[in-house]
Amino acid sequence: MSTAAVTDKRRSSLRSASLPKWSPWAIAAGSIVVAVGIGEGAGLTSHIQWGLIAALLFVLGTYVIASAVEGRRQAKDRIATSLVWVAFLLAVVPLVSLVWTTVKRGVKVLDPYFLTHSMGVVADSEPGGGIYHAIIGSLEQVGLATLIGAPIGVLTAVYLVEYGRGGLARAVTFFVDVMTGIPSIVAGLFILSLMLMADMQPFGFAGSLALAILMMPVVVRSTEEMLKLVPNELREASLALGVPKWRTILKVVLPTSIGGITTGIMLAIARIAGETAPVLLLVWGNSFINNNPFSGAQQSLPLYIYQQYSQSSGSTAAFDRAWAASLTLIAFVMILNLAARGIARWKAPKTGR
Amino acid sequence: MAKRIDVSGLTAYYGSHKAIEDISMTVEPRSVTAFIGPSGCGKSTFLRTLNRMHEVTPGGRVEGKVLLDDEDLYGNGVDPVSVRREVGMVFQRPNPFPTMSIFDNVAAGLRLNGNYRKSELNDIVEKSLKGANLWNEVKDRLNKPGSGLSGGQQQRLCIARAIAVEPKVLLMDEPCSALDPISTLAIEDLIGELKERFTIVIVTHNMQQAARVSDRTAFFNLAAVGQPGRLIEIDDTERIFSNPSVQATEDYISGRFG
């Protein structure tokens, strides 16, 4: 008797009943249809409720069908997969909806005129005007904050990873952790108190200082992780060549991790670019163009959005400008992120294959 | 210009743990000395004390004397950086710098130390790569990243990088353990050539390798787990492998250990 005949007679221990490849899609479609039916029938007005019902039905349906056809182990696998998908959708739907709303409302007044003019002679309730002064302010404040925060952050991380031993390093790590949790308004108040002591008027650089405080711990944390990823063998290889430690760090460790460090800095910049509270306290806002961050009140994009929304007593023109400025801010942050990815890819150690 | 190493009464610690105890030996210039012994007996630790790489490990410290042609490496005011320029090292796993090309990897020691003339650099890189028997394989792709080479080529690249700074002594910590037999043979041939110019110390787990490449062999052992490793004996390789004077050495070499 041939072996093929034997395997035909017995049930194979390696094969078992399985759902076809298209079954997740079918279950998803089915649960959406049922959810719409339930929603209509029960008179639920909110589409969010419909979506949640569909998600629940999808997870439950997958489990019931899979455990009936395939068995419990495969059903658990499928329920894990479907949970991941549902979580992914729950995360992505609000994001897409946010970007979509901002783009739809923002493009109305977003044109070259809007980007190159200030609000100098335009009342907040009237149409016209632009965000040139806010862009200048944002760029200068964030740029100065980065010039202060990024080097200090990177050097702190270098200290923690390459030199720090014992009490001081533990203290620094602890304070970095504490700083990560500082609310932005507190950082703003801290600088404000210094400003009041020195009897100064609001100016852009004061905002930069508060933003630098917010930025530093983020940079320290991400840089630390990146430096820890550099294999110790590379440090030893360099030291064994008779290269001093500081040059090893400068020429071997930092270049190896520069891609990740840059990404971390860019993400930190993205974080502070959207800060409103410290800017509100320290920079105040200004309808006119002020190119000098060291003297006089300035504008910034998040502050502009807030003021257009809150101080215009419901004027449509102001709302449109707020949305357009929001779109500009999102685009600014996104360009930074893309630049970070580009740099990370460009600087990543080459495999040479 | 190879140099002689005289070690006397050397003890090394990791924190409070004593890793090796009271080791004394002489390493002759222009020869290959092999260290053999079971894992954990302190061969690599001892090797790393010879160019002050041991203290790079947190908690690592050393007592005793290591004389490099009559100059104590652990004497007052000795700069470990200068020691490492005299005593180069090749590691167990090939570790070329991933951000650098093949050329830059070989030039790294000179460039990072900053003491070279631009006009010499090409010659030194070519000479070092030829010295490491790698020149013919890479001469057309010197600007490609070093990490794209095969494991054996990477290890020879690391050897080229180490000899480019013209050390007096070359320490090799199991340089072939991550390589296939053909690459191993290439490195062993290379060691035979390099000993004309350098003093070579090699740690190996492969006793045939020790027998093939070395002039003198040192056997290390530890009394028990957690005890510090000790030098059992050092002698001409031929003698160690035919008629060692200590029973433990014979047991280890003939596979009757433990």
Image: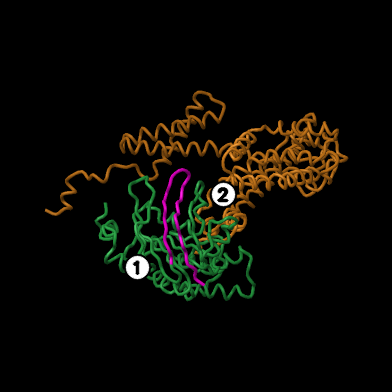
Q: Is residue A218 visible?
A: yes
Position of residue B124 in the picture relative to residue A315 (left or right): left
Q: Are marks 1 and 2 on the same chain?
A: no
Q: How many marks?
A: 2
Q: Pick whichever, A195 or A323, lies toward us.
A: A195
The x and y percentages for residue A320 are 75, 38
- What's the amino acid at mark 1? Asp
Query: As displayed, is residue A220 above or below residue B108?
Result: above
The span picked out in magenta is: B1-27
Which mark, by number, is residue A227? 2
SS of the residue under disc 1: strand
Q: Chain of mark 2?
A: A
Mark on residue B94? none
The green chain is B
Q: Position of residue A280 (x, y in %)?
A: 77, 34
Nearest-to-viewer mark from 1 and 2: 1
Q: Position of residue A111 (x, y in %)?
A: 76, 48
In which image quadrant can residue A324 be found? top right
Say whether residue B20 is magenta.
Answer: yes
* Residue at which label 1 appears: B236
What residue occupies the far right of the structure in this picture? A121
Residue A346 visible in the snapshot: no
